[in-house]
Amino acid sequence: MSPNANARASAKGTVLEVKKLVKEFGGVRAVNGVSFTIQKNELVGLIGPNGSGKTTTINMISGVLKPTSGEIWLRGERIDGLPPYAIAQRRLGRTFQVTQVFRRMTVLENLLVPAFARAGAGAGASVSAQRDGDPRPRALEILRLLRLDHLKNEYAGNLSGGQQKLLELGRVLMLDPEIILLDEPFAGVHPKLKVQLHEVIRAMHQEGRTFLIVSHDLQTVFHLCRRLIVLAEGTKLCEGLPHEIRDDERVAEVYLGR
Ligand SMILES: Nc1ncnc2c1ncn2[C@@H]1O[C@H](COP(=O)(O)OP(=O)(O)O)[C@@H](O)[C@H]1O
Ligand SMILES: [Mg+2]
């Protein structure tokens, strides 16, 4: 990262820090000592060829996988080893590479599920104005933002792949996350919906939310993200501004080398 970008970011405070993260699957190191820091309101891309450890990394951060070793800090609190719901309560949201919507529920019902789940989780979570009371107005507002409001009574299973990705993002937004991890949000999405997805991410970013976007779609992340972290074979190859990464020979090598 350039000194300028560094100074700009550190003025805002660290949201997420991972230190020497390792994940082994049966003796194979899928992630091998990855460290990085994300500052508040950054829009960071996590890129790298297939199999480089991107999904495994965000699975560890979101609590889906327990790291073999290493540390994960969210706003100064160590969270590695916590279950996914506890991390979601700490306002870290994520979407999945393979979209997970409730196909036999309507679009609106899909958004209401996390709100009811949270209500059921008790008073442990921090309280914001919209956390209590009827979640419907917030759900409808999010559907309008995602331009899915005309589909609110449609079964989620009838939506296109791209619309399901938007819906999954909407479900994450219901939990009012401060930091959002997206795993391959653009894969298989129709170009028109891709533009729409960009707009939503930009709007959410302008609201002050922080993004870590996993993608192997280089053009898209170069365009959208302000800073990039590159993984290769489970280790961090480099990080920097998009133009620095674009001109980095090592990055070209790991992408073309496959
Ligand atoms: N549950 C698992 N069991 C065994 N190996 C896995 C598992 N998940 C991922 N891997 C392996 O870990 C490596 C990194 O995978 P992944 O994090 O999915 O990469 P990426 O998201 O960058 O494509 C790959 O070699 C993959 O085969
Ligand atoms: Mg992946």
Image (spheres, rainbow, N blue to C red):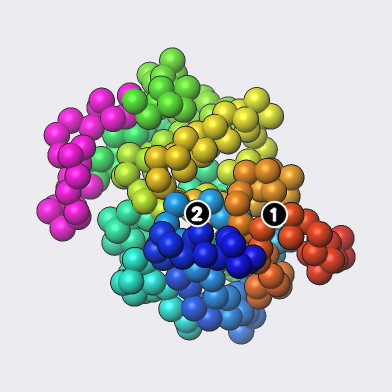
Quadrant hosting residue 28: bottom right
Residue 158 against residue 97 in the figure, above or below = above
Tell me the residue that label 1 is attached to: 242
Query: What is the total number of numbered labels drawn onto the structure image?
Result: 2
Please provide the residue range marked out in magenta: 118-140
Q: In the structure shown, which secondary structural element does the residue marked by tag 2 occupy?
A: loop
Whether residue 142 is in magenta: the answer is no
Q: In the structure shown, which secondary structural element does the residue marked by tag 1 occupy?
A: helix
Give the residue displayed 62% in from the left and 44% down from the top. Answer: 224
Q: CA distance from mark 2 to mark 1?
A: 13 Å
Q: Position of residue 258 (x, y in %)?
A: 85, 63
Q: Position of residue 41 (x, y in %)?
A: 44, 52
Quadrant hosting residue 90: bottom left
Q: Seen in the image, is 201 located left or right of residue 111? A: right
Q: Seen in the image, is 159 located left or right of residue 225? A: left
Give the residue displayed 52% in from the left and 64% down from the top. Answer: 7
Give the residue displayed 53% in from the left and 81% down from the top. Answer: 20
Type of the residue with mark 1: Pro
Tell me the residue that label 2 is attached to: 42
Whether the residue under disc 1 has CB within 8 Å of ligand 1: no
Type of the residue with mark 2: Glu
Numbered badge on residue 104: none
Q: Seen in the image, is 174 located left or right of residue 125? A: right
Q: Residues within 10 Å of mark 2 (few under 14, many from 20)?
A: many
Of labels 2 and 1, earlier in sequence is 2
Q: Residues within 10 Å of mark 1 (few under 14, many from 20)?
A: many
Give the residue displayed 23% in from the left and 47% down from the top. Answer: 118
